[in-house]
Every structure is written in structure tokens, then in C-alpha cells.
Amino acid sequence: MNPRIQELLDRIRQIEEELEREVKRRRGELNADFEQRRVFFAREIKQQQRRFKTGLLTYLLHAEWRHLVSAPFVYAVIIPLLLLDLFVSLYQRVCFPLYRIARVRRRDYLVYDRGALAYLNLLEKLNCLYCSYANGLVAYVREVVARTEQYWCPIKHARRTLQPHERYHGFVDYGNAAAYRAELRALRAELAALDAESR
């Protein structure tokens, strides 16, 4: 990889780590325990949150008409999402071992913690569950596809791409045939090494 690109990627990772430390510090101010994939709020905090809760009936009676009209279309998307989840999970279970690519751990991408918020009513919690699933699924699928791309065609595009996945910048430059042949094996080996790192 180009040393300047590697330097920039290292700086981006440092900024992301700093951002995560700041987010963790802010969470600490909420007097909540966010460890072990579960959330625990102190009793006083939950009581304070409940004061901001809108009851389900009040919430529905004051809903905007455009939200009610769009609801069937929003929730109908669950069907293709479930099918996508099924097929991508099946794809990586069958193909990744054959290619010696470390499997993506689905549970790392699906985070369901908003249900612990006492200021949300049942429908708001359902909406948060749905959004968490959809966004987590897309992130999971993106990583599966990114690893597949790194294995089969780790070449940058000639044109700029919007929000490329995090593996993209390690790919070979467009048009650099010698580097592609020289680096393909190393890029594939990197994917197999991910398995050891995740343990």
C-alpha cells in the first residue's frame, strides 16, 4: 500500500478511537452500565426517563397522517431484509470456508439496546428495534461483500466512490497491473488472518 495512504488511514483510525473514547466518557455521565452487550440504568435514571415517556394511545392519536400512511410501506421492507439476511448468511457459511475468508460475526453488527430506554413507548421501541435490525444488517452485509471484493477484485475504481467500505483503501490502484498481480495473494491472506484476530 502507498505509504501516504497508510499514514492517512492510521490517522483516521486514531481519530475514530478518540471519538469512541469521548462517546464512552459521555455514556459514563448517564450513570449507566453498558458492558457485556446489556444496558443497566440506575433506578433514579429510569424514573427520570419515564417522566418523558408519551403513552402509546396519546402517541397514536397525535401521529401525523403522513406517518400513518407510510407505515405499511416502511414495515413491508422487513420481508426483503429477512431474505437478504438469510441469503447472505448462507452465502458466507458456504463460500467463505472454501475461500479461506474469516466469517463475519453477525452479532457484532446487530445491536438492540434501545429497548432499555424508559422514555420510549412500545411502538417507539418497536421502531427502534426495526431500525437497529435494518442498519445492523446492512453493515453486516457490507462487510461480507467487502471481504468478497477483497478476495476476488481488490482494485480501486477509476472514479471516486461515495463512502467506500473500510477495506477499499487497501486495494490496488486502478490500472496498476503489476501491483495487482503482486498484491492479490497478500490481500487474500489478510482475510484468512482475520479469523485468528477475532478469537
Image (tube, rainbow, N blue to C red):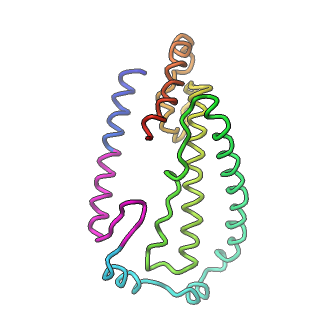
- Who's the residue at 48% across and 38% down the image? 166
| Vertical placement of residue 38 versus 107, above or below | below
Q: Quadrant of residue 46?
A: bottom left
Check the picture and name the quadrant holding the N terminus.
Answer: top left
Is residue 37 rendered magenta in the image?
Answer: yes
Q: Quadrant of residue 3?
A: top left
Residue 43: % across, % down: 33, 81
User: Is 156 or 114 nearer to us in this picture?
Assistant: 114
User: Is 70 or 145 nearer to us in this picture?
Assistant: 145
Count of numbered labels shown in the rendering: 0
Task: Say left or right for 10 vs 111.
Answer: left
User: Is 119 or 106 nearer to us in this picture?
Assistant: 106
- Who's the residue at 62% across and 34% down the image? 96
Residue 16: % across, % down: 35, 45
Residue 84: % across, % down: 69, 50
| Vertical placement of residue 194 versus 65, above or below | above
Q: What's the magenta region?
A: 16-40
Furthest toward the top, the residue is 178
Residue 179: % across, % down: 51, 14
Check the picture and name the quadrant holding the C terminus.
Answer: top left
| Vertical placement of residue 110 versus 74, above or below | above
- Who's the residue at 39% across and 86% down the image? 51
Is residue 38 rendered magenta in the image?
Answer: yes
- Who's the residue at 53% across and 46% down the image? 105
